[in-house]
Image (spheres, rainbow, N blue to C red):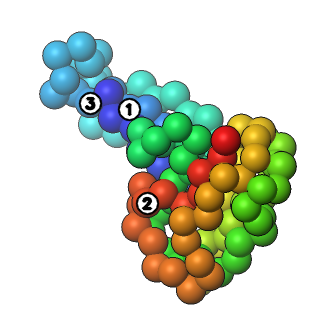
Amino acid sequence: MKRLRITVEGKTYEVTVELPNEASAAPVASAGVSAPVSASPVAASASLSAAGPGVVVSPLGGNVVGIGVKVGQEVKEGEQLAVLEAMKMNTYINAPKAGKIAEILVTVGTAVQEGQPLIRIE
């Protein structure tokens, strides 16, 4: 299984794809028929990362163009935390869980990589 992020008509999805060369994968019938895929809308939400408990990471590489929270602020799940710009498109980073902003790890103007820690929520 491989996790991928795709954007279709402005909506971003995280997908899990079974690859034919994996031992547990189902065979692919013919050309033009894709392997089984499960998709769920991301709504530009960053996930909590293995980078540490409560760490929200960048879902893509880009530049930080806005930070909408402050250290100590209480946030609700889904509340906007930051805005990234990549290829002249904005991606809104939303809180994956409710909590208190413990640390902001980037500043406006920072260039970030996919998976880079942005904000830590307690």
Residue 18 placed where, x, y %?
33, 27
Residue 9 placed where, x, y %?
65, 60
- Residue 114 vertical placement versus 35 (above, below): below
For disc 3, the neighbor class at 10 Å (few under 14, some 14 to 19, many from 20) is some
Q: Quadrant of residue 97?
A: top right
Mark carried by residue 19: 3
Residue 32 placed where, x, y %?
34, 39
Circle 3/circle 1 CB separation < 8 Å: yes
Circle 2/circle 3 CB separation < 8 Å: no
Q: Is residue 66 visible?
A: yes
Mark carried by residue 116: 2
Q: Is residue 12 visible?
A: no
Residue type indicated by callout 1: Val
Q: How far apart are the alpha carbons under marks 2 and 3? A: 26 Å
Q: How far apart are the alpha carbons under marks 3 and 1? A: 6 Å
Residue type indicated by callout 3: Leu
Indicate the secondary structure of the residue bearing disc 1. Answer: strand
Give the quadrant of the N terminus: top left
Indicate the secondary structure of the residue bearing disc 2. Answer: loop
- Residue 98 vertical placement versus 117 (above, below): above
Indicate the secondary structure of the residue bearing disc 3. Answer: loop
Camera-nearest label, 2 or 3: 2
102 on left or right of 60: right
18 on left or right of 4: left
* Residue indicated by mark 1: 17
Residue drawn at 76 percent across, 65 percent down: 70
Mark carried by residue 35: none
Q: Quick one: 80 or 1, which is closer to the camera?
A: 80
Residue drawn at 77 percent across, 64 percent down: 69
First-in-chain label (2 vs 3):
3
